[in-house]
Each structure stands twice: as structure tokens, then as C-alpha cells.
Image (spheres, rainbow, N blue to C red):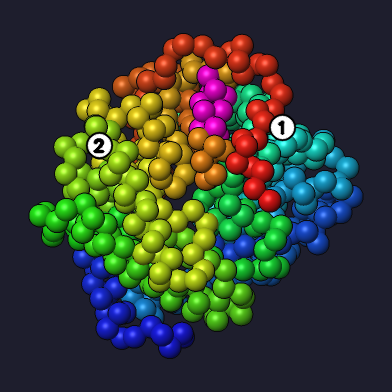
Amino acid sequence: MNSSFNYAEIMETINMVSNENLDVRTITMGISLMDCADSDIDKTARNIYDKICLKAKDLVKTGEDISRDFGIPIVNKRISVTPVSLVGASADCEDYVPLAKALDHAAKEVGVNFLGGFSALVHKGMTKSDEKLIRSIPAALTETERVCASVNIGSTKAGINMDAVYTMGKIIKETAERTGDRDGIGCAKLVVFCNVPEDNPFMAGAFHGIGEPEVVINTGVSGPGVVRNVLSEHPDLNLGQLAEVIKKTAFKITRMGELVAREASRRLNVPFGIVDLSLAPTPAAGDSVAEILEAMGLERCGGPGTTAALAMLNDAVKKGGSMASSHVGGLSGAFIPVSEDAGMIRAVNENVLHLEKLEAMTAVCSVGLDMITVPGDTSAETIAAVIADEAAIGMINNKTTAVRIIPAAGKKEGDCVEFGGLLGSGPVMAVNQAKADDFVKRGGRIPAPIKSLNN
């Protein structure tokens, strides 16, 4: 154990765990699959299964042992792998569904709940393998239980690949239709990114980047309930003082995350990578980012002042985390997934929080439009336009943005879908009906902004 962690610090953290919903949201093992490639797709699939089972065989048990030994809940144990479009590139095959099934079988064998990396990076263009991977996504997410997919369609350096954006609009629609009997849950396992990080431990967007080690341990820590409770104890502080309180709280949470990550690294004999300090909410009462914003003085998340409050929260979390650890990475800030946050759900149901306000909020938070459920008849073109808007925010502001959107078949505005578990329940949100079809269908690439010329 790292000797810089003292007993008093650990005991304070245990109190947060006991009373304020603090947990380690995930220990994620990243595994390189580059040496699994073969011209025979079935051989590649066997290699993938064998390597994951070998490297991750002790992951779940180790997480459970650390949780028991330290009294810190570790909610999820997960795996991220090399983007499958790279691993499958040399295989002679029609699609990569066999590789998705191998990933799913391996995830089940080692006992993790999600595995990320059925992914492609196409921000400047698509290879044949990328196209094959993307075409495989609807079937792969329908025929597997634990596999998550992601596609990076833009970056500050490259601009936005609008051909890929439109393609992903159609892929999301097809995935929703194939899993329509489960309210389109396949789309809950699919993220479209701009400026994707390669060390993110959170699903559904995790994958093992090409600059990463052979195997690595990353952790994702979450503590919305801790931050909300601390803020409620200081109703008279001004916003500058409140930011200091959030920073100190984020510092403590991050220290816990690094403690767990380093202990997992030691026990598994795998390098420690990063701690992702993201305030990731759950449907549980009191575990809400929206309620943090309301504790700052907002009547309801989504009203005037929400973007400013979220900006302050996100900045303070990053500052506190970076002081606590030299290895903060991933996304690290505040997530705003609608279906996973009881306060967000309440704000949508009360007609206070709308899609346009969520888009504004994504300019200052960690990710983007996350777990947004929309009417099932929303067109592929409209979904693509939403992705393009979100990617533009990321590209111009040199930050990660993402879209995880679920067109729920047969559902309309005001309905509700139930995904269960951490995915929660999604109120179906209204989408602006003005069409962007002609814009999306132009294709090509939106050029990178002038700030990309910074070498």
C-alpha cells in the first residue's frame, strides 16, 4: 500500500461510504488485443477469448477482496480492450459479430458486467475495417449482453467526419429497432465521441488506447452524494468559498480512488494507469448531480443558472482531483446522464430540463448528451444532426463530448422506458422537429478549427 495514505484519511472516507453513497464505481482492466489478430476470424475470436480469460481471471475476486478488506464498495469490475476495428483488420470475414461474441463470452467467463472496445476511430476517415466494424454494431449489440461499442467521429485536430456522423445516425436507428422489444437498450451500450480519451474506465465508451501498456488498471470513482451533503452543510457560503469546499471534497474522493487502484495494481501485478474522478450519478436517492446544482441554490436543474453552476462544479472537481493525484485521467468531472440521475429525471418530468439546455450544459461538463431517450420515430438524420452539434462543441472547445441517445420504438414524448440497474429509467424527451436532412446529407468533413494549428 502507498504509505502516503494515512489512517485518519481512510476513516474519513469510510464515513463517506457509510453515509453518503461514496463508492468506487469501477475497476477497469485494459487489455491489448493487438497480438490476437489473425487472417482467420475464428482464430482471432479464440485468441481474444483466451487472452481476456488469462489476463482478467482474478479481476473480479481481487475487486471483491479489496472491497471487503477496506470497507469500500467497488460496484463494477469491467474490461476495456483495443478497438476491435484494429484487431480484426487482417481477418478475412464479412463482419465482426464473431469477435463481439468472443468478447461477450470472455466477459461472462471472468464475471465482469461490461466490456468496452467494440470500437472504431474514424475522425478523419474510415478504413475498410472501420466500415466493417460499424456495420456490425447493430447485430453485435443485439446478440451480446455485456459488450459496449463506441465510435470517435471528430477531434479538434481533425475536424468532424460528417460521413461517419450520418452513418452513425443510421446505425443508432438500426440498433434501436433490433432491440425495440427492450426499449432500444442496445443504444445504451453505444457512444459516439468527439475527442475520445483512450484511458476512460467508464462504460459504454471505454476502450484500451493504442498508446497504453499491454495490461493496465484504471479506476472510476464517484461521489455525487458526498458533494451534495457537503454543500448542504454550507448554505451561507459565497460561490468562491463553495468552490473551495468542492475542491477539498474532490481531493479526498480522488485519494480513495488512487488507494484502491494502486492496491488492485499491486495484487494483480498489473501497472496502475489513472483515476477518473467523474461525479457519475445513479438512480439511487441522494446520488444525483442535479441535486448538487440545486444545493447551490437553483430551484431546479435546467433552469437559469444551471450552466454556470455546472461549470463551477466541473472545474472545482478537476482542480481537487489534480491536487490529489498525478494520475488523474479519463474524463474526470461531472456526468449528466438523464436516465441515471433521479434529479435529472425529475427536472425533465417537470418540463424544466430540455434537450437544448442539456446541450448547453455539455459545453462545461465532462462528456455530453448521455442516456437521452427520444421518440422512436426520430429520424436518423435528426440523430446525426444532434451528434454533429455535440461534436462541434467538443471540437471547438478542445474537450471530450459524446452522444448516447436512445430512440425508443413506439414511444413518444412523455412516455417512460425502464432499462434497469445503473441505467435507470428514461423519460422520453422532445426533439426539435425542424429538419436538418439536407445539411447532414452533404457529407464530407467539417474542417478542424484554427486552434488546431498549435504545434
Q: Residue at x 85, y 40 (%)?
A: 93
**What segment carries the magenta color?**
382-392
Q: Disc 2, disc 1: CB below 8 Å?
A: no
Quadrant in the rendering for residue 56 = bottom right
Neighbours of disc 1 within 10 Å: few (<14), some (14-19), many (20+): some
| Disc sitting over residue 305 in the figure | 2
Q: Is residue 433 above or below residue 5?
A: above
Q: Secondary structure at mark 2?
A: loop
Q: Nearer the viewer, mark 2 or mark 1?
A: 2
Provide residue 399's location: percent of width, then percent of height.
52, 45
Distance from disc 2 to disc 1, alpha carbons, whole Å, reads 41 Å
Identity, as a three-letter code, of the amino acid under mark 1: Arg
Q: Is residue 50 above or below residue 155?
A: below
Which residue is at 43% across, 88% downward?
A: 3
Q: Quadrant of residue 365?
A: top left
* Horizontal side of residue 200 vs 138, given as left or right: left
Task: Say whether residue 178 is visible.
Answer: no
Note whether 338 is above or below 329 in the view shown.
above
- Looking at the picture, tell me which residue is in the foreground, 330 or 370: 330
Q: Which residue is painted at 39% across and 33% down in the image?
A: 360
Is residue 54 visible to us here? yes
Of mark 2 and mark 1, the one earlier in the sequence is 1
Element under label 1? helix
Residue drawn at 27 percent across, 33 percent down: 302
Total tally of numbered discs in the picture: 2
**Mark 2 crowd level (few <14, some 14–19, many ≥20, 10 Å Cα):** some
Does the magenta run of residues contain 446?
Answer: no
Percent from the top left, x then y, of residue 394? 53, 39
Q: Which residue is mark 1?
A: 135
